[in-house]
C-alpha cells in the first residue's frame, strides 16, 4: 500500500505509529473539482474551506494556494490560518458563541466577513466596529427549517438548533433589521449550513429556496438586497460501500440551477463551505497491532496503538470506516477473519471498526484506516494522557511532518503544582 507515492511501511519506519498521513495531491484534486464544478456553471462563486475539518497551518496554506477562502470558528483557527499566511480578507468567522475577544481579533485582523449567529453578537460587533472606527461585513446565519438525512449531532438546519436565526417567527428578519440599522455593519449576505455528510443536492435545493424567500422578505420589509448567499458545507464522502454521495459536479449544478431559478437576474455570488469533502478522503491513519484477543464464539478484538483519542467519530456518532491490513512480514494470508478493531483507551466504546473482514492479523502488523482526514486530528484528545500522533504530508514520493508527534512531556506541559502540594 502506497500513499502519495510512498510505501506505508516506509512512512511507519520513518515516523512511527499511530500516524496521520495526508495526501497533498488528493486535497488539491478536491479543491480543483469544486472549482471545475462551479466554473462549468458560469456563476460567480466562492469556495471556502471549513477549516474545522482539519485546521493545521500546512492545510491552510494548500487550500489558499488552490484559491479557496477559509472559514474559522475560533481565535485558534483564525490564528492558525493567519500564521500560515492566509489573506485575512479571505477568512470568514463563524461560531454560535464567539467571545468578545474573538470578534475583536477578527475585526482587527480584517477578516472578509463575520457570520452572525445571535442578537447579542450584532450589538457586540457594532460596538467593536465603532470603537475601531471601521465597518464590518456580516452574513446573517439562517436556520432554514431544513431537516437533512444525517446523524442528529451533525444536522444543523432544523428549527431546533443552537445555530443561527430561525426563519420561523420573523426572528431572522429581525436580525437583518438590526444589522441594517447598525451604522458600522454592512449586511453582506445570507448563510445557511444544513448539516454534514449529505449525499445529494436535495437539502441544498431546499435551503436555496428558503434563502430566496428570506431575501424577498428582506427586500419587502427593509428594502435591502444582498449580493452573496452561502449554502454551507456538508458535501458527503464515501466512508464505506454503504455511502453513495452524488458527484460534486452534479450537486453543484443542481444547487446553482435552483439559485438561478429563484433569483433570476438578481443572481448573487454563491458560496459554499466544504470541509470533509476537501480533506476527508486524503487522510489515512496507520496503527500498529499490539494485541489480539480471540473470544471463541463471541468476537476477535484486534487492539491498535490509537483509538478514540485520535478518532472519536465512531464513539461519538457510530461512524464507520474501511481498513486495510499491512502484514509486518509482507506475507498476506489468503484466509480472512472478521475482527473488531479496538483502541487502547479505557472505554468499552473505544472501537474504531466493528466486524471487518481482514486477512489473518498478527501482532506487529499495521492497520491503515482510510478517509480519516476530516474531524479526526481536529477532534483528537489526550484522554488517558495519550500523546497525539504526528501528521505527515506526502506528495509525489516526498514526505514531511506537518504536526510533530506529542510526547509525554507535552502532555504535562500545562500542568501546574500549587504550592500547598
Ligand atoms: C457552518 C459550517 N460550515 C461548514 C461546515 C463543514 O461541513 P462539512 O465538513 O460537512 O463539509 C460545518 C460543519 O460543521 C459548519 O458548521
Image: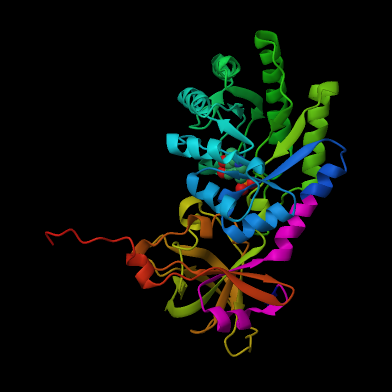
- x and y percent of residue 337 in the render? 57, 76
Question: Residue 189: where, in percent of width, then height?
Answer: 67, 27
Could you tell me which residue is drawn at 80 percent across and 48 percent down? 35
Q: Residue at x 78, y 41 (%)?
A: 252
Q: Position of residue 13 (x, y in %)?
A: 56, 84
Q: Quadrant of the C terminus?
A: bottom left
Viewer-side residue, 67 vs 133: 133
Segment tinted magenta in the rendering: 4-33
In this view of the protein, which residue sits in the foreground, 193 or 350? 193
**The N terminus - image quarter:** bottom right
Residue 52 is a magenta residue: no
* Camera-side residue of 153 and 381: 381
Q: Is 6 a magenta residue?
A: yes
Task: State whether residue 247 appears in this view.
Answer: no
Displayed quadrant of residue 209: top right
**Image point 70% across, 59% down: which residue?**
27
Viewer-side residue, 102 vs 190: 102
Q: Main secondary structure of the magenta part?
A: helix
Can residue 381 be seen here? The reply is: yes
Find ligand 1 in the image and state its quadrant: top right
| Residue plotted at (59% across, 21% down) | 167
Which quarter of the picture shows residue 176?
top right
Residue 133, image x and y in percent?
55, 26
Q: How many tags in the picture?
A: 0
User: Seen in the image, is 28 located left or right of residue 400?
Assistant: right
- Compared to residue 257, the image places residue 82 above or below, namely below
Which residue sits furthest top?
221
For the view shown, which residue lies furthest in the front direction? 133
Amino acid at each position: 500500500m502506497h500513499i502519495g507515492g510512498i510505501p506505508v511501511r516506509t512512512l511507519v519506519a520513518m515516523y512511527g505509529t499511530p500516524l496521520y498521513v495526508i495526501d497533498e495531491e488528493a486535497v488539491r484534486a478536491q479543491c480543483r473539482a469544486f472549482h471545475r464544478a462551479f466554473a462549468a456553471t458560469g456563476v460567480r462563486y466562492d469556495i471556502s474551506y471549513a477549516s474545522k475539518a482539519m485546521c493545521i497551518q500546512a492545510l491552510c496554506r494548500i487550500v489558499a494556494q488552490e484559491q479557496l477562502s477559509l472559514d474559522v470558528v475560533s481565535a485558534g483557527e483564525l490564528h492558525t490560518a493567519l500564521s500560515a499566511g492566509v489573506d485575512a480578507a479571505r477568512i470568514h468567522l463563524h461560531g454560535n458563541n464567539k467571545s468578545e475577544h474573538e470578534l475583536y481579533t477578527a475585526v482587527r485582523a480584517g477578516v472578509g466577513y463575520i457570520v452572525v449567529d445571535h442578537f447579542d453578537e450584532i450589538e457586540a460587533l457594532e460596538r467593536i466596529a465603532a470603537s475601531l472606527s471601521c465597518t464590518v461585513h456580516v452574513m446573517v446565519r439562517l436556520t432554514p427549517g431544513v431537516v437533512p438525512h444525517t446523524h442528529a449531532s451533525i444536522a444543523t438546519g432544523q428549527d431546533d438548533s443552537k445555530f443561527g436565526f430561525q426563519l420561523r417567527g420573523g426572528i431572522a428578519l429581525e436580525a437583518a433589521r438590526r444589522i441594517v440599522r447598525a451604522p458600522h455593519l454592512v449586511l453582506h449576505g445570507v448563510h445557511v449550513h444544513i448539516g454534514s455528510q449529505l449525499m445529494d443536492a436535495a437539502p441544498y435545493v431546499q435551503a436555496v429556496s428558503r434563502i430566496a424567500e428570506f431575501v424577498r422578505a428582506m427586500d419587502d420589509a427593509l428594502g435591502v438586497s444582498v449580493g452573496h448567499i452561502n449554502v454551507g458545507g456538508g458535501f458527503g464522502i464515501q466512508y464505506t460501500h454503504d455511502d453513495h454521495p452524488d458527484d460534486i459536479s452534479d450537486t453543484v449544478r443542481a444547487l446553482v440551477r435552483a439559485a438561478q431559478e429563484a433569483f433570476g437576474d438578481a443572481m448573487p455570488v454563491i458560496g459554499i463551505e466544504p470541509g470533509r469533502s476537501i480533506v476527508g478522503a486524503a487522510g489515512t491513519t496507520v496503527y500498529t497491532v499490539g494485541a489480539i484477543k480471540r473470544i471463541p464464539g463471541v468476537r476477535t478484538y484486534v487492539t491498535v496503538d490509537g483509538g478514540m483519542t485520535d478518532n472519536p467519530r465512531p464513539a461519538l456518532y457510530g461512524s464507520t470506516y474501511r481498513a486495510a491490513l499491512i502484514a509486518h512480514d509482507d506475507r498476506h494470508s489468503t484466509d480472512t477473519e472478521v475482527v473488531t478493531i479496538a483502541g487502547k483507551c479505557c472505554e468499552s466504546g473505544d472501537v474504531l471498526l466493528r466486524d471487518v473482514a481482514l486477512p489473518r492479523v498478527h501482532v506487529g502488523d499495521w492497520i491503515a484506516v482510510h478517509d480519516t482526514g476530516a474531524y479526526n486530528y481536529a477532534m483528537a484528545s489526550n484522554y488517558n494522557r495519550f500523546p497525539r500522533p504526528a501528521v505527515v504530508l506526502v506528495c509525489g514520493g516526498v514526505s514531511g511532518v506537518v504536526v510533530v508527534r506529542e510526547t509525554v512531556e507535552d502532555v504535562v506541559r500545562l500542568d501546574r503544582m500549587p504550592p500547598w502540594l
